[in-house]
Amino acid sequence: MTILTLAKALNEGMRKAMEDDPKVLVMGEDVGKLGGVFRVTDGLQKDFGEQRVIDTPLAESGIIGTAIGLALRGYRPVCEIQFDGFVFPAADQIITQLAKMPLRSLGKLKLPVVVRIPCGGGIGAVEHHSESPEAYFTHTAGLRVVACSNPSDAYEMIQQAIRCDDPVVFFEPKRRYWEKAEVDIPTSSAGSAAWLPFDQGKVVRPGTDVTMLAYGPMVKTCLEAAKAAEDDGRSLEVVDLRSLNPLDVELVVESVRKTGRCVVVHEAAVFNGFGAELAARITEECFYNLEAPVLRVGGPSTPYPPSRLEDHYLPDLDRVLHAVDRVFAF
Amino acid sequence: MTADASHGEAPPEFVQLLTPEGERVQHPDYDIDLTPEEIRGLYRDLVLVRRVDLEAVALQRQGELGIWASLLGQEAAQIGSGRALTEADMAFPTYREHGVAWCRGVDPVNLLGLFRGVNHGGWDPAEHNFHLYTIVIGSQTLHAVGYAMGIQRDGADAATIVYFGDGATSQGDVNESFIWASVFNAPVVFFCQNNQWAISEPLEKQSRIPLYRRASGFGFPGVRVDGNDVFACLAVTRKALADARSGQGPMLIEAFTYRMGAHTTSDDPTRYRVAAELEAWKLKDPIERVRSYMFKNQIADQEFFDAIDAEADDLGRDVRKRCLALPDPEPLAIFDHVYAEPHRLMDEERAQFGAYLEGFEG
Ligand SMILES: Cc1ncc(C[n+]2csc(CCOP(=O)(O)OP(=O)(O)O)c2C)c(N)n1
Ligand SMILES: [Mg+2]
């Protein structure tokens, strides 16, 4: 066991993936000499050279477009988009090309491209640096979409994403980059075979009264809420979805059938957010077990506000507990 | 083949009217005739915008701003080009154009408000003919061209100028904007501040030819100017704007300068660039050369310089005071201005959130 920050765990995971497979490349703006603005790729260029860790020109469409070309040539590019709000210049390449090319080739082409996106707010940043664009990508067939919430998952999931033959959009909760936890770094490859597949979710705190569904940055908030609710005699089960597409429906349904109540928490706007899919699905699968409608906690349906207002925008302990109160009041 | 973006040493094709030592030199294509009063005005601008920038960096260090993008070293490029604009001209900035904002009469406290996080801009772009800051690299170049196409259709005696960095020249939007401007002969001046760095990436990561030469491939002229020479920046931009207004189409100006500070206050440039580079550029300081020119030519005396320094300190103090007094926006302001027309979802969410907040009172 080693104690790592989430950022360092990603770094170690990428390092391991690069050691394991010479075809793995890292590319993006400032990822080389600087090691990325969040230092997630720190030291990789020094150790693997400029051919494998590439400081690209400043153009996101170019990053993803050329990653597709490299993948067609047998490489496994791991692309860093510097901030969530800057993925949009690459949206065309991701949605019209990356997501659909394997299908168009009737399965002959594989595009093992990972698009890493630091996401979410809470760091006092200016516009376009605090967004949660996951629903755009979960809505795009052909992309796997995952989100890590803690160092241990970060270490494992980034390696699984890199090994996956599908394109993966990989969300990293930027405000949790500096949080530390124990990470089990296996000494043999048998160790990684035992990892939970990265398209499965995980119950991170068992409970009996309400299912809290979260991913990325909001998992921690839900765990804090579960702790606080315990004092009121309420037992919250916290599920870290980890994978949004595909969704681990089985795990979600099993939990909600048991608890009969569900609150979904994400930073993204509630209106047409990922929680809408969850609520609809749960209503279909768990209708007779539900004591209350599925409630969603998320951002208002507005652009992310200036940072002095972000504490109001982001779901916090109070708003999560408020929803828990409401789900009991039905 | 390598780019001639030799750090520290500018290559020859370069418009300069005032050397780093403060000597007036001639250029065959560009010249400028400035009254002593105008020169004193430019000097004052340079000093004041540097002072505001310094205050903003200090405010960020003290936790009063979330972040700040310093213009240190780029004052001449911004004041020279900014003072070339007529009232009717329109400017589209990035996030670093505090000097141009100054020329357009935007209160510096508005800039600080954005970086403090009380709003996303706060000034009226139409009142100042100075658009909002654009953070997504390169997007504004297309807006500027569209605006210029509007000017063209209106038959107005105006042009637009759009600012962007060396890194931005790689973006698709910027290249598309060159094509649009060229095809439609739009009255737009592309003002690229090549400060040699895009965060940690040196110019070589974006281009293997000097940036101003890109223009010829798109079918319009490009020129490189000493970006630390306020006279040259003013002369070249004035001419480019005049040409644009008179129907001669777009032009690319590459202001060859240097980002003396960190990319932003979050950045640590010691990780990727050497101190010697900074030292070399210090000798080309945009303010020092004007000062020594003015001294040598008796355009100003010590009393004048002291008065400007005192004015700068007053401005610094005033900006600080008003920045600290900026009120945080009301929580329900989150729902304001998202739509121009009444919108049911906004009304519903505003009411819900208002009721939620009231639950905490009393
Ligand atoms: C589309 C987009 N991608 C990435 C970023 C992050 N970013 C902010 S500034 C910057 C470098 C810009 O360099 P340059 O264009 O040279 O301007 P400078 O900051 O040097 O003035 C980057 C990569 C961004 N703001 N927008
Ligand atoms: Mg630059």
Image (cartoon, coloured by chain):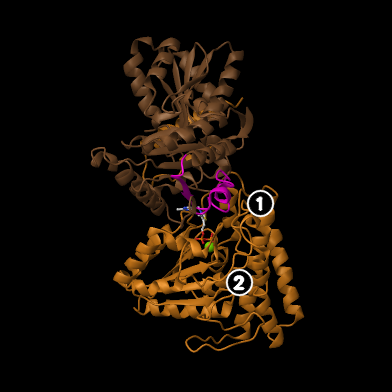
Chain colours: A brown, B orange
Mark 2 touching mark 1, by CB under 8 A? no
The answer to whether mark 2 is within 8 Å of ligand 2 is no
Q: Residue at x 61, y 76 (%)?
A: B42
Checking the image for residue A308, the label placed there is none
- State whether label 1 is within 8 Å of ligand 1: no
**Residue drawn 50% across and 57% down?**
B133
Observer-nearest of B213 and A3: A3
- The image's mark for residue B60 is 1
Q: Main secondary structure of the magenta part?
A: loop
Q: Is residue A30 magenta?
A: yes
Q: Nearer the viewer, residue A43 or B148?
A: A43
Residue type at mark 2 is Gly
Tell which circle, 2 or 1, labels the residue nearer the N-terminal end. 2
Asked whether residue B287 appears in the rendered view, the answer is: yes
Disc 1 on helix, strand or loop? helix
Q: Chain of mark 2?
A: B
The quarter of the image holding the C terminus of chain B is top right
Regarding residue B166, the answer to whether it shows in the image is: no
Q: Which residues are magenta?
A: A21-50
Using residue B311 as the reference point, say whether residue A162 is left or right of it: left
| Amino acid residing under circle 1 | Gln
Q: Position of residue B21 (x, y in %)?
A: 67, 82
Residue A8 included in the magenta stretch of the image:
no
Q: Is residue A160 above or below residue B4?
A: above
Q: Neighbour class for label 1 at 10 Å: few (<14), some, many (≥20)?
A: some
Residue designated by label 2 = B8
Q: Chain of mark 1?
A: B
Q: At 62% across and 60% down in the image, what residue appears?
A: B273
| Rendering coords of residue B263 (x, y %) | 59, 57
In terms of secondary structure, where does tag 2 sit? loop
Q: Is residue B33 above or below residue B163?
A: below
User: Residue B320 at x, y = what percent?
Assistant: 68, 56
